[in-house]
Image: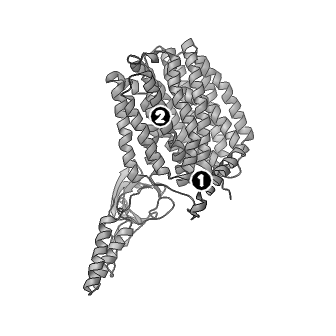
Amino acid sequence: MALANAVAVVQKGKEGKTIYVVGGRTKTPSGISNLQNTTFAFNLKKQTWETCAIISDGINTTNFSAGAGVPVGSHSVLILGGDNGLTFHKIENYLSQIAQTDNPEEKSRLIAEKNILNTTHQGFYKGMLLYNTLTNKWSKLVVGLLWIVALLNYMDRQMLATMRPSMEIDIPELVSGENFGRLMAIFLWIYALMSPVSGLIADKLNRKWLIVGSLFVWSAVTYMMGYATSYNQVYWLRALMGVSEALYIPAGLSLIADYHQQKTRSLAIGIHMTGLYVGSALGGFGATIAAAYSWHSTFHYFGLVGVVYAFILVFFLFEKKVSETTTVDPDSLSSNDKQSLFKGLALLLTNISFWIILFFFAIISLPGWATKNWLPTLFSDSLGISMEQAGPLATITISFSSLLGVIFGGILSDKWVQKNIKGRVYTSAIGLCLTIPALLLIGFGHSLFHIVTAALCFGFGFGMFDANNMPILCQFVSSKYRATAYGILNMTGVGCGALVTSILGKYADSGTLGNGFALMAGVVLVALLVQIIFLRPQVNDYTDA
């Protein structure tokens, strides 16, 4: 096969360094090109060619020509841009017809139509596809794109927790632990109240634009935080950030769940969750950057990054619906939407399994949010170190171990559920088991070894739990209502986070913050027992009529 405009990339394959030739086009006697959806591999060691997987987004195949390709990591090939042939074939058809006609009027009409197409078409292929040379599979780069959004989501909200000492100089109200707890809690309360609304919106509207809009607004708010001069200004900006950030998680997770089916769902969501943990860790350096420059500049820099990335997503992120859209009578659209809304809520609120998931999700959210908002302070108090040291140490410890936990938990869950339908539940339960002794040691430990070891154990267990929340939800809720369901989970979990954040503020002022952490081990044990005893999935991917 003679190929033109193919992409050639050198990357490691199963048997060492390999040249991968992706897509391309071939000429035909008619003058109309055949665009290819092929992937070929040339083994440099054996000097042999092999036909690999057809180019696809993991679900639908696509042709590809005249694009760009780069090696990513050690075993992946990324392609983007280029042409899938839809517009190109139309132009070639016009050129062929123009060459064949002898009628001047017909030729002029065809030329005019071709020129209109050239100047008004919406561009060529805009997708970003990733090929894994080990698994010989193509997939759309949704998780990678949303990973950065997840990073920014937690980075922007988390850095305030470590920048308190720098901001106290200009905003003296922050000296009070109770005031600081209120500042952290207002974000969580607003975030909680908005979460079910965000889920309902994500189930009805285009999730791409919800994600882009949410990222742009919270990044702009982060930028504006750098101009705040009073406690009230910071307070209301945090509230606005809660509104905008709440739109992301239900939309992002349901989009990933639609792109990744049963065998890769936990791992895909787990990889996405690592973005949250990396963002949380980077947010821990807020105090370090603020000490080197200023807290105003820190907010400005982080905010600008998000604003720029929101514009990038406009071109590369795409919606994916599992079921085809149906045509409805416009006069009955509003009525149908209301019926669908109430039906979805009714199905969720009458589902006993959903209430069980809601219960243990809410309980583990208590220590989950406590570690995000108060662990740097606990590290500083228990170890007698400055916040510039305690902030990065606490956030990196939790984030690094959680990152390992979600990857391990995602892989284990995806494999276990193929053999036992409760595999995801058991994986999540193992994670909860690890958090119980960790919370006790975090609360009562006073040496660097004890507290850091406990934080690593908590983070790993929490990561295993976190990677399986949406996959477990998929076992009990259909794709039509998953964003709504996760929105309700988020509301309850974050509401519990707001409550525990405020309560721990009082513990911090009284010098007993460690006791507050240790007490949470008991309630996690109750949640663990409820999860194991009462949660009984029947299928891996629930569907309803």
Counting other residues with Cα less than 10 Å from the Cα at mark 2, is it few (<14), some (14-19), or many (20 or more)? some
For the point 36% across and 52% down, which residue is it?
A: 71
Residue 461 seen by the camera: no
Outermost residue, bottom direction? 102
Outermost residue, right direction? 533
Q: CA distance from mark 1 to mark 2?
A: 36 Å
> In screen coordinates, is 244 left or right of 524?
left
For the point 34% across and 70% down, which residue is it?
A: 88
137 or 342, which is in the foreground?
Answer: 342
Residue 398 seen by the camera: yes
Secondary structure type for disc 1: loop
Residue 457: x %, y % from top left: 56, 29
Amino acid type at image mark 1: Gln
Q: Which residue is mark 2?
A: 240
Secondary structure type for disc 2: helix
> In screen coordinates, is 59 left or right of 166?
right
Residue 99: x %, y % from top left: 27, 82
For the point 57% across and 60% down, which residue is it?
A: 323
Residue 375 sits above or below residue 359 on the image: above
